[in-house]
Image (tube, rainbow, N blue to C red):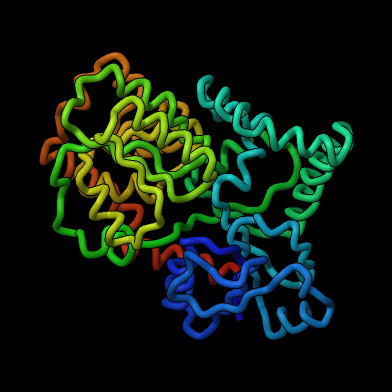
Amino acid sequence: MILHIATDEKWIDLAYSQFENVSPNNNKVVILTEKNSVEYIKKTPFKTLRQDQITKQVLNELFENVSAVVLHSIDILNFKISIPNQLKVLWIGFGFDYYDFIYKDTNRLLLPKTSHLKKKLIKFNFKTKIKKMAAINWLIEKLKGRELKLDYIKNIDYFVPVINDEYKLIKNNHSGYFPEFIDWNYGTLEDDLVRGFESKTIDANNILIGNSATFTNNHIESLDLLSHCNIKGRKIICPLSYGNESYGDEIANVGRGLFGSDFQPLKEFMEIDDYIKTISSCSIVILNHVRQQAVGNIITMLYLGAKVFLREENPLYTNYKNEGAKIFSISEMIKDPNLINSNLSYNDIEQNRIFLRKLYSRIVIKQKTEILIQKLLN
């Protein structure tokens, strides 16, 4: 039996389906949560586990008949679950949970205006923390968390990054032990990422910016850039349902201030079909992340025929460009704003679809899952 330990994330349904497809009736899922219900998991059978429920007896029952453990991110350290030494452990990274192994200072992921906004929004919370504990103690706790993470990964055998090139970045920037690399991805084109939209293409000329209400989107800089472009009459779609609510509210206010009713923030969580239908009206996608992020959105939009702009520092840009994708950089857009006034050609769209099938088709992902499970269970 493979035990999947996760938090309430939208990717869990995809993972469970992929593992069951290769190893049926051999997967059980435990969701670590302090809430009474989950929001994003819709199809996966699971049990919940709160921190105050974790006892020796509970852990013994949890690992009974288990041959391997899959950690869907290590955003679980606070639960302090000790995994038996004889079990093989796989960590599927989400990005945020391993980026401190690439960037010593994660503030480098924020552009200047976004960094200023973050300082403004967290100022009160930081003052509250200082009132509760001295600044030096707060720093010690932060360093302890880092040490806890370093200690935890010593017992992990395998690691899946979001994109393969990130493993090289980790190895170049981290001198200690790091688990062995495995190539794998959540979801397939046919079953998840473009299901029901296989024959569709972009049907309007709107603009999509960002993928969530998180600082690493650098929305302020994207909105500032668009304010200097001729986009009159085009809607700006901005997903903000996922992440930091205060930040999302601030971005919604800034967007409306610059573009009025043409700025359309998506504040409520949408089912995947409704979400894809909404963003398929966008012929231009601007993702201003320094780090890898929004991979699902990028895959979907490239397949549908959108022109996607990424930062050159983003590992995804280099990775996809080298693999043959027709994508563009933010710096190209700055030099030539008219790039957002033309769409991809038919040949460019087909080129991107060939590239995506090579990496994310059902048959390719099944093969990757078979190799992964073989490593775990042998």
- Residue 159 location, x and y as percent? 60, 54
Image quarter of residue 239: top left
Relative side of 185 to 194, left or right? right
Image quadrant holding the C terminus, namely bottom right
Q: How many marks?
A: 0
**Residue found 46% across the figure and 35% down from its top:** 217
Q: Which sits in the foreground, 224 or 203?
A: 224
Image quarter of residue 8: bottom right
Image quarter of residue 17: bottom left
The answer to whether 88 is drawn above or below residue 200 in the figure is below
**Residue found 39% across the figure and 38% down from its top:** 210
Q: Which sits in the foreground, 165 or 200?
A: 200
Q: Is residue 264 visible?
A: yes
- Name the residue furthest top: 335
- Residue 253 location, x and y as percent? 41, 33
- Residue 116 location, x and y as percent? 57, 22
Q: Which sits in the foreground, 289 or 207?
A: 207
The answer to whether 226 is drawn above or below residue 101 in the figure is above
- Residue 49 location, x and y as percent? 68, 73
**Residue found 72% across the figure and 79% down from its top:** 63
Image quadrant holding the N terminus, namely bottom right
The answer to whether 46 is drawn above or below residue 361 in the figure is below
**Residue found 12% across the figure and 40% down from its top:** 347
